[in-house]
Image (cartoon, rainbow, N blue to C red):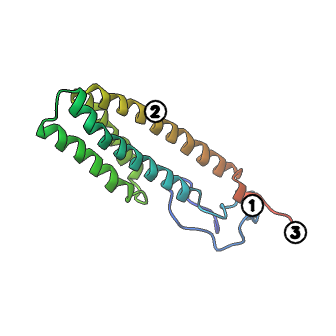
Amino acid sequence: MAGMRNQSEGDDVGSQDQPGAPEPGGAVPAPATDPWKGFRGVMAGALILEAITVLLALPVVATVGGGLAWWSVLYLVGVAVLMIAGAGLQRRSWALAFNLILQIPVLAGVFIHGSIGIIGVVFAAVWGLILVLRSDVKRKMEQGLLPSQRVQGPA
């Protein structure tokens, strides 16, 4: 239908129709603004914060963990670089899967030092919350309950 958004994708295709106008046949109107744009920003921000946290763990591992080996530095810096690069790829259809897969090497960092594993557990919880929020936005969008989907009366 014209003006309907593809509910399963976070693409930037929008409606050319009047925002918030009821669709013919009682269909849910498309949001006036793209809710997935803000969601992609949240995911990019979470990746940047996680990369900073992983890099800040380097001095902890060096001091408390008995020193850094070349492979542990390469591992942690490599994971952080992947996260920073991933933050710029959030428009891709595979971005969420990439973000979740990046949590595996952080969790596996427990073998370098326990503090890296703790960082992995904390950010796994953050990504779990992001998935819950994504589900909530998707459900509200399908039901037409987003603020930008509300039909506005004549002014």
Label of residue 125 in the image: 2
Write the residue at 51% across / 57% down: 10
Residue projecting furthest to the front: 63
Q: Amino acid at mark 1?
A: Gly
Is residue 2 visible in the rendered image? The answer is yes
Residue projecting furthest to the bottom: 16
Q: Disc 3 marks which residue?
A: 154
Q: Quadrant of the C terminus?
A: bottom right
Q: CA distance from mark 1 to mark 3?
A: 21 Å
Q: Amino acid at mark 2?
A: Ala
Within-10-Å neighbours for mark 2: few <14, some 14–19, many 20+: few
Of residues 105 and 73, the one nearer the viewer is: 73
Please state the horizontal and vertical placement of residue 145, each as a whole percent of the image: 71, 50
On screen, residue 4 above or below 52? below
Q: CA distance from mark 2 to mark 3?
A: 44 Å
Which circle's residue, 1 or 3, is located before the other in the chain?
Answer: 1
Of residues 67 and 76, the one nearer the viewer is: 67
Q: Disc 1 marks which residue?
A: 25
Please state the horizontal and vertical placement of residue 57, each as a whole percent of the image: 30, 37
Write the residue at 27% across / 51% down: 81
Which circle's residue, 2 or 3, is located before the other in the chain?
Answer: 2
Q: CB of mark 1 within 8 Å of CB of mark 3?
A: no
